[in-house]
Image: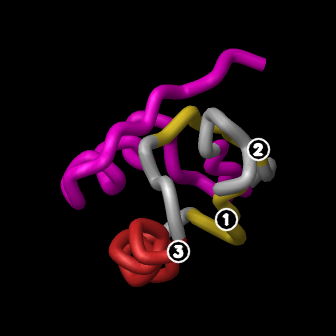
Amino acid sequence: MERKEFKFKTTLNCGGCVSKVQSDLDNAEGICHWNVDTANPDKILTVSSNGITPDEVAAIIKKKGFKAEPIAG
């Protein structure tokens, strides 16, 4: 399966926020690697996908009480 990279504008403002979603993202099937740039004003989440869809990633983030809007690109 082809790997794809998705980017999201999020409300993950700090390391504490990131730690709340870490386990879910680490254990989500179809995610190879992920990273949140909390230094960026838009708090960009980058996900390397191996089968997961942008909607599924956003649902994981939203389930934890944060927002994740896909960035077209």
Residue designated by label 3? 15
Q: Nearer the viewer, mark 3 or mark 1?
A: 3
Which quadrant, please, contains the N terminus? bottom right
Which quadrant, please, contains the C terminus? top right
Tell me the quarter of the picture where residue 43 sits.
Answer: top right
Q: Earlier in the sequence, mark 2 or mark 3?
A: 2
Residue at image location 43% in from the left, 44% down from the top: 11
Residue at image location 39% in from the left, 42% down from the top: 58
Mark 1 to mark 2: distance in Å? 12 Å
User: Residue 59's spot in the image, x, y percent?
Assistant: 29, 45
User: Residue 47's spot in the image, x, y percent?
Assistant: 66, 54
Dot 3 falls on a residue whose secondary structure is helix
Q: Is residue 35 magenta?
A: no
User: Residue 60's spot in the image, x, y percent?
Assistant: 32, 55
Magenta span of residues = 44-73
Residue at image location 52% in from the left, 51% down from the top: 52
Q: Is residue 22 depicted above or below 37 in this figure? A: below
Residue designated by label 1? 34
Dot 2 falls on a residue whose secondary structure is strand
Q: Earlier in the sequence, mark 3 or mark 1?
A: 3
Q: Is residue 32 depicted above or below 38 in this figure? A: below
Question: Looking at the picture, which amino acid does disc 2 mark?
Answer: Lys
Left or right, 6 with respect to 56, comes to right
Q: Is residue 54 magenta?
A: yes
Q: Nearer the viewer, mark 1 or mark 2?
A: 1
Picture disc at residue 4: 2
Q: Is residue 5 depicted above or below 23 in this figure? A: above
Question: Looking at the picture, which amino acid does disc 3 mark?
Answer: Gly
**Residue in front for this viewpoint, 73 or 39:** 39
Question: Looking at the picture, which amino acid does disc 1 mark?
Answer: Trp
